[in-house]
Amino acid sequence: MFTGIVEELGIVKKIEILSGGNIEFGVECSFWQELTLGQSIAHNGVCLTVTRFDQNLYFVTAIVETLSKTNLGTIRGGDEINLERCMPANGRFDGHIVQGHVDTVGICEDVTQNEGSWLFVFSHPLQTGYITVTKGSICVNGASLTVVNSEKDNFSVAIIPYTHAHTNFKNIQKGSEVNLEFDILGKYIAKMQHN
């Protein structure tokens, strides 16, 4: 389980297409020596397993199913990726419940800078469980955020300077694809209402 508090921006240094269309990513970050094989790390909000190490990189594999539901297939060498290690059992819960199971890819429809903050508008497919509520939680590229405005197929979030500087939000522009994980509580409620 994750909390959506991005720990660090990693750099994707190696990309290899494996058999069956799976992709292996070699990632550089400051805490790579603290990682262990089999450990789960969120990459732009996608939970992936550490499979090996080589020099100062750790490696993870995204399978075709994961690539079909996330923006990981658009990642290129040198791209920055939001990283978060799993929440320790005795850790603080600073964000919200994030599973690392991305629901869908959203599209950035607009970015507006406003006196030291940024307002991002993201659209998403209309589907049961894809629910946002004003002042509720949403996970965008692995970052736990508060919804500013909520519509059926889009929402907005306000980004403070710290988040803008320390995540890949600084690279998101109109037309960018982002990973969305909707609030698990909202998904359960939507399922109960539609059964």
Image (tube, grey):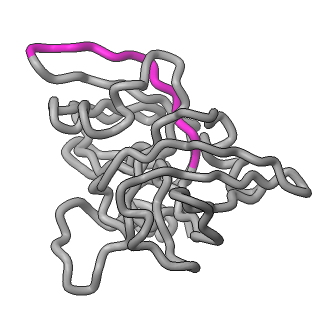
Residue plotted at (30% across, 64% down): 3
In the rendered view, would you say 183 is above or below 90? Answer: above
In the rendered view, would you say 3 is above or below 92? Answer: above
Residue plotted at (42% across, 53% down): 29
Q: Quadrant of residue 22?
A: bottom right
Give the dominant element type of the magenta stretch: helix, strand or loop: strand
Query: Residue 84 at x, y = what percent?
Result: 37, 60
The answer to whether residue 112 is magenta is yes
In the rendered view, would you say 159 is above or below 2? Answer: above
Residue most extreme to the front: 55
User: Which portion, as a residue range, is magenta?
Assistant: 104-115
Q: Quadrant of residue 109?
A: top left
The image quadrant where one finds the C terminus is bottom right
In the rendered view, would you say 125 is above or below 82? Answer: above
Residue plotted at (54% across, 55% down): 102
Asked whether 126 or 23 is in front, the reply is 23
Residue plotted at (37% across, 45% down): 9
Left-right relation of 56 to 151? right
Query: Residue 35 at x, y = what percent?
Result: 45, 73
Query: Residue 61 at x, y = what percent?
Result: 69, 60
Asked whether 51 or 109 is in front, the reply is 51
The answer to whether residue 45 is magenta is no
